[in-house]
Image (cartoon, grey):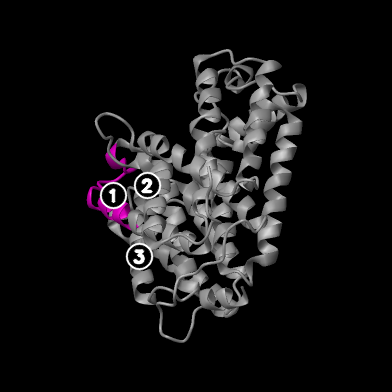
Amino acid sequence: MKFKQPGPLSRRSRVLRSVLVLGVLAGNLLPDIGGVSLSLLSIILVAPVIVYEVLRFFPRVHPVLLIVPIFGLFALHVLYISPTSAYGEDKLERWLTSTLVTALCACLLRDRRTLYTFAVTWLWVAVALALLAAAGYGGGRVTLFDSNPIWFGRMIAVGAVIAVWLWWQRVVRPWLILLALAVLAVGLIVSGSRGPVLATIVGIVVLTLLTGTGRAWKAILVVCGGFVAILVVQNLPIFQESRFATLLETEATASLRDVYWNLTIPIIAEYPSGVGFGNWSFYAGNPRHLWPHNLFLEVFAELGVAAGLFLLLAVVVIMLKLAVTSRKRPTTLLVLGLLAVETVHVSVSGDLNGRTFWFMLTLGVLYATNTVLDALPPDRSDGKGSRLQVESAHN
C-alpha cells in the first residue's frame, strides 16, 4: 500500500472527521438509532478511518500508537487479579475496545485547522443541546433524551471553554460568543451537575492565565461574569429548585464522594499492587456505587500504585509541555484548557472508562510531540488579524 505524504485536510474531511469524532464522544447524549447508541455506531465507523490515518504515516510510526501499549499494560493487571464480577469484566472489555478506540480518535484531528473545526462543531452542538434542555426544564436535574445529567454537564462545560477560547482568539464575533455562553450557562444550571461547573471555571482560568495579551481585562471579565451568574442563580425563581441555589452553602458541599474517597485511601495503603478491575466496590464494603468517582484514585486502588503514579506523571508532564508552547500556539492552549477540564471531570465523577478524558489526554500527547500539522483557518473577526494568523505566520 502506497500513500502520498500526509498534508492538511480538505474542508470536507475536516467537517466529516469532526462530526465523526463528536459522535464517538457525545453520541450517548443523543437518541439511539434503531436501538443502537449513536456513540457505538460512531465507534464502528471511526475504527477503519483510524487505521487509514495511521497507515498514511508509514513507514513512520504514528505517535498515537504510543497509547496502545499503555492500555495493554494496564489490562495485564488481570494476570495478577482477575475481575470478580460482571461489572469488572465489562469494564475491562470496554477499556480494550471503546475506550481505546476513543483515545486513538485523536489522530483524526490531523492539523490545527481541523481542531478549530472540531471546536466550533462541539460548541454549536452543545448550544443546541443546552437550548433543548432549557426548553424542557421543570426543576431538579434535566435528563436530555434520558441521558446522564453529568455527561450532559460535561458536554456543556467543554463547549463553554471552547467559546471563551474562540472569544480570546477573536475568530468569532463577541456578541455571538456572549449569546452562546449565556445559553451554555443555563444548560449547566439545569444539568444540576456541580462538577462541570468547577471544570468550566478551571478551564477558563487556564485560558486566561496563559493568554498572550489582555490578561488583566480578561481576568476581570471572568470574575464579573461569575459574580453575575451567582446572582442570577440565587435570585431568579426558575432556578430556586436547582441544586445551584444553595451552591455556596456549607452543607451543599458535603458529598457521597467524600465518603468514597475516604474508603479508597486505606485500600491503596493495604493493597499497593491493586485489587483488580471492578473490584473496588467489594474491598470498599459494597457501597451504593461500584466506583470511587475519581479516575485517579480508582487506578491507584484497582491497578496499583505504580499505574497510578505513571498516570499522574503523564498528565503533569503533558500539561507542562503544552503550557510551555501555548503562548505561541493558541491551538495548543485550547488543547491544554480542554485537558484541564476533563481532568477535573474525572477527578470528581469519572471512572476508568471516562472516554473523553483519554481522548483529550491523547490529543495532548500529539500536540506535545508536535505531531499535528500546521494549518490554520483565516481570520473571521474584524480584519485586524487574529492570534491564529500570528501562529500560522510563525510556522
Tag 2: residue type?
Ser
- Residue carrying label 3: 180
Q: CA distance from mark 3 to mark 2?
A: 16 Å
Q: Residue furthest front?
A: 2
- Residue 133 left/right relative to 304: left
Q: Which of pointers 3 and 2 lies earlier in the amino acid sequence?
A: 3
**Local SS, label 2:** helix
Give the vertical position of 1 relative to 321 (above or below): above
The magenta stretch spans residue 265: no
- Residue carrying label 1: 133
At 64% from the left and 29% from the top, the residue drawn is 72
Give the vertical position of 394 relative to 239 (above or below): below
Give the vertical position of 223 relative to 362 (above or below): below
At 40% from the left and 73% from the top, the residue drawn is 172
Q: CA distance from mark 3 to mark 1?
A: 14 Å
Position in image of residue 220 (x %, y %)? 53, 75
The span picked out in magenta is 127-145
Tag 1: residue type?
Ala
Quadrant of the snapshot with the C terminus: bottom right
Label 2 packing within 10 angstroms: few (<14), some (14-19), many (20+): many
Between marks 3 and 1 in the image, the one whose residue lies nearer the viewer:
3
Question: Badges 2 and 1: C-beta atoms under 8 Å apart?
Answer: yes
Q: Which of pointers 2 and 1 lies earlier in the amino acid sequence?
A: 1
Tag 3: residue type?
Ala
Question: Badges 3 and 1: C-beta atoms under 8 Å apart?
Answer: no
Front in this rendered view, residue 345 or 4: 4
Label 1 packing within 10 angstroms: few (<14), some (14-19), many (20+): many
Q: CA distance from mark 2 to mark 1?
A: 8 Å
Q: Which of pointers 3 and 1 lies earlier in the amino acid sequence?
A: 1
- Residue 258 left/right relative to 12: right
- Residue 10 left/right relative to 263: left
